[in-house]
Amino acid sequence: MNEQLLGLVSQYGAPALFGIVAIAAVGLPLPVTLLLLIAGSMISQGAMNLWIAIGAAGAGSILGDQAGYAIGRWGGPKAIARFRKMAGKRGRIAAIEAKVRAWGGPGIFITRWLVSPLGPWINLASGAATYPWHRFLFWDALGELTGAALYISLGRYFSDRVMALDGVLGNVTWAAVALLAAIVLGWRLLTYFRRNARQ
């Protein structure tokens, strides 16, 4: 499938990039980081315009994120129940909703580009938690444009080593997810021990 997606981007350029990242932002697991790096490589070869690529990738991601938010906000209990089944554990969406309320905008911003595998779940949870839409849109747009500019620029400057760079970035992303999980777990343990010490 990666070859087909890369073929679409190389053949149709920015419109294909827009469509693929929009679909991925809704929740379909597609290799968006790799596509953005490839787009950057194409820019270095003169096959695509930098600003059009960043705009198309950013706009597609924002559109897909808004669809996820809308599903969470207005999709009703049936839509939420379906996503909970997809998530595996029943409490996962509820836990993410609590994190959205606690972290707010900066949490949305980080999941747009640093820990992007959590992005679709954060979109859904933000809607379900009735996080204010104008704030969601601001942090979402800021994060998605940052991510598009970052990955496309990396692909542009390291155009001869895109596949190796994709592997490194994948490792960095999962390391960031693990670090984030360790921080959350540490905070919970600290809160638990403080509560028990008071009692």
Image: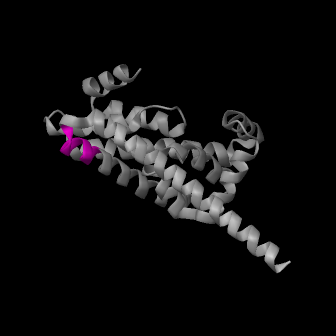
Look at the magenta stretch and give its main secondary structure. helix
Q: Position of residue 52 (x, y in %)?
A: 26, 43
| Residue at horizontal 71 percent and vertical 39 percent from the top | 84
Residue at the left extreme, as displayed = 46
Q: What range of the chain is rendered magenta?
A: 152-159
The x, y position of residue 2, in whole percent, is: 38, 24
Which quarter of the image is occupied by the C terminus? bottom right
The answer to whether 134 is drawn above or below residue 56 in the figure is below
In which quadrant is the N terminus drawn? top left
Q: Is residue 4 above or below residue 132?
A: above
- Residue 113, image x and y in percent? 42, 50
Q: Is residue 62 visible from the viewing direction of this image? A: no
Q: Is residue 150 visible?
A: yes
Answer whether residue 112 is magenta in the image. Answer: no
Which residue of the protein is positioned furthest toward the bottom in this rendering?
198
- The residue sitting at 52% across, 50% down in the picture is 177
At horizontal 76% and vertical 37% (from top left) the residue drawn is 78
Kindly identify the residue that appears in the image at 62 percent across and 60 percent down: 184
Q: Position of residue 10 (x, y in %)?
A: 26, 26
**Front residue of this view, candidates 44 and 189:** 189
Viewer-proximal residue among 81 and 34: 34
User: Where, by quadrant of the figure, is residue 57 drawn?
Assistant: top left
- Between 167 and 55, the residue placed more toward the observer is 167
32 to 95, vertically: above or below: above
What is the tally of numbered marks visible in this picture?
Answer: 0
Q: How is the image coloured?
A: one colour
